[in-house]
Image (tube, rainbow, N blue to C red):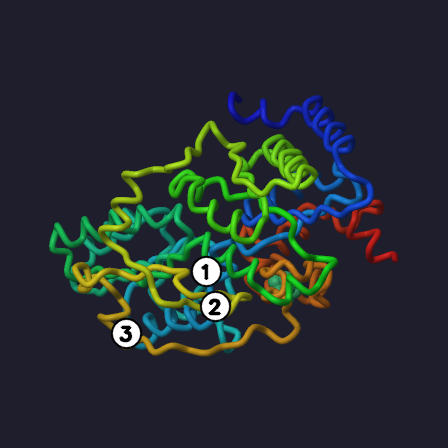
């Protein structure tokens, strides 16, 4: 298939692996964080880590929208169903994420809660039109990629006078999270996992462009390469990062030129700016409160904001005891560092969000089973 198979060619992967092997300085370590869960899965699915020299290590970041949502926000969504009798519309990934008290949206649905899995915001609007006597709330999550469709739905609902529809907004912003990671004292002081460079997100960057990363590339002196999601994209981007680090450069480069431009999708950005504004701070699982890292619905669309329509107090909730999701999302631990991994916690019985989502690091480790192979960096570390 054009634009897919050509980015998975074995012969080209081997050439890139050879080029990276020749480019690396054997006397230094290259810790490269892939922010996106999509990159994490490409790395595991295609065995990209196994093709890297031992001193090039991928560090998994917080770029999984389901994983970073704190439990308290899921508890809020459950309250909407249980206390306000709304029809809650949600993407499928959210259904199985554990909430407080061993609940999840799936369990609440099984107990009779009216929770509907949708594939788009348009599905949620259709449910609202079909149920004029019920309140319908869309549980909006995701990074900059999923924000424009939420903006479209809010505008359409306002224009169409759809009075029973509202949005529980949990949209978060990538650059603020990367900056938070770079400012983290934990990552600065723990030398073995300090991050030398970043793979910039693919889909997010198709919306916001490559320009927003320029500030922290310069400020924190870390190179960023916007990378596509196919294995050759990841390998080519790894080579570009290695070359920048060797040459002492810290620039934003774009490997994913077939989709991403410096300015991004102006139409989508304009739409988002019309409907949303910055929150002063927002809690991320793993990162805590991050300033200006999420969006809220503007006053001009305030009637469609579920947080204003319903009483939704902030809920402080903790992760399941022993779950290392917060540390994994910060890049300071790996799934195999969690004692529950593969024993108590599996995709069939997830204890934390990182095992639920198709973009979560624990799900990637488990699904592709590479932690079981001898010779992989994890296996070598465990054996040491
Ligand atoms: S293996 Fe399960 S419990 Fe452990 S960090 Fe991952 S999601 Fe949490």
**In this view of the protein, which residue sits in the foreground, 335 or 195?**
195
Kindly identify which numbered label has been placed on residue 70: 2
Residue name at image x 13 percent, y 50 percent: 159
The CA span between labels 2 and 1 is: 14 Å
Q: Quadrant of the C terminus?
A: bottom right
Residue name at image x 34 percent, y 59 percent: 295
Kindly identify which numbered label has been placed on residue 181: none
Camera-nearest label, 2 or 3? 2
Mark 3, other Cα within 10 Å: few <14 / some 14–19 / many ≥20: few
Q: Position of residue 10 (x, y in %)?
A: 69, 25
Kindly identify which numbered label has been placed on residue 84: 3
Q: Position of residue 147 (x, y in %)?
A: 34, 50
26 is higher (above) or lower (below) than 365: above
**In this view of the protein, which residue sits in the foreground, 86 or 262?**
262
Q: Which one is earlier in the sequence, the residue at label 2 or at label 1?
A: 2
Contact (Cβ within 8 Å) of mark 2 with mark 3? no
259 is higher (above) or lower (below) than 104: above
Camera-nearest label, 2 or 1? 2
Q: Which secondary structure, mark 2?
A: loop
Q: Which one is earlier in the sequence, the residue at label 2 or at label 3?
A: 2
Q: Is residue 157 visible?
A: yes
Kindly identify which numbered label has been placed on residue 95: 1
257 horizontally vs 314: left or right: right
Q: Which secondary structure, mark 1?
A: helix
Farthest residue to the right: give it: 384
Mark 1, other Cα within 10 Å: few <14 / some 14–19 / many ≥20: many
Contact (Cβ within 8 Å) of mark 2 with mark 1? no
């Amino acid at each position: 298939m054009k634009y897919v198979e050509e980015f998975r060619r074995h012969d080209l992967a081997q050439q890139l692996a050879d080029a990276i092997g020749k480019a690396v300085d054997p006397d230094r370590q290259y810790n490269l964080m892939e922010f996106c869960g999509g990159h994490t899965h490409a790395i595991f699915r295609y065995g990209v880590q196994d093709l890297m020299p031992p001193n090039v290590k991928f560090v998994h970041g917080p770029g999984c929208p389901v994983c970073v949502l704190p439990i308290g926000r899921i508890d809020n969504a459950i309250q909407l169903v249980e206390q306000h009798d709304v029809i809650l519309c949600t993407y499928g990934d959210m259904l199985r994420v554990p909430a407080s008290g061993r609940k999840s949206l799936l369990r609440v649905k099984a107990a009779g809660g009216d929770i509907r899995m949708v594939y788009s915001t348009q599905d949620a609007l259709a449910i609202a039109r079909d149920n004029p006597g019920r309140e319908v709330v869309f549980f909006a999550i995701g990074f900059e990629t999923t924000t424009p469709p939420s903006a479209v739905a809010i505008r359409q609902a306002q224009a169409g006078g759809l009075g029973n529809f509202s949005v529980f907004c949990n949209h978060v912003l990538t650059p603020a999270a990367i900056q938070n990671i770079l400012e983290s004292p934990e990552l600065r002081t723990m030398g073995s996992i300090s991050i030398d460079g970043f793979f910039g997100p693919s889909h997010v960057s198709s919306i916001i462009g490559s320009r927003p990363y320029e500030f922290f590339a310069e400020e924190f002196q870390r190179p960023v390469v916007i990378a596509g999601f196919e294995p050759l994209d990841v390998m080519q981007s790894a080579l570009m990062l290695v070359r920048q680090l060797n040459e002492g450069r810290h620039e934003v480069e774009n490997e994913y030129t077939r989709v991403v431009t410096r300015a991004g999708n102006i139409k989508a950005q304009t739409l988002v700016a019309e409907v949303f504004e910055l929150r002063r701070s927002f809690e991320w699982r793993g990162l805590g409160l991050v300033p200006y890292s999420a969006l809220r619905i503007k006053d001009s669309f305030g009637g469609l904001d579920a947080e204003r329509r319903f009483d939704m107090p902030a809920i402080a909730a903790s992760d399941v005891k022993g779950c290392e999701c917060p540390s994994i999302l910060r890049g300071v631990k790996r799934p195999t560092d969690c004692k529950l991994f593969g024993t108590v916690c599996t995709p069939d019985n997830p204890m934390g969000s990182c095992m639920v989502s198709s973009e979560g690091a624990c799900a990637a480790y488990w699904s592709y089973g590479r932690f079981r192979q001898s010779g992989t960096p994890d296996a070598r570390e465990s054996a040491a």
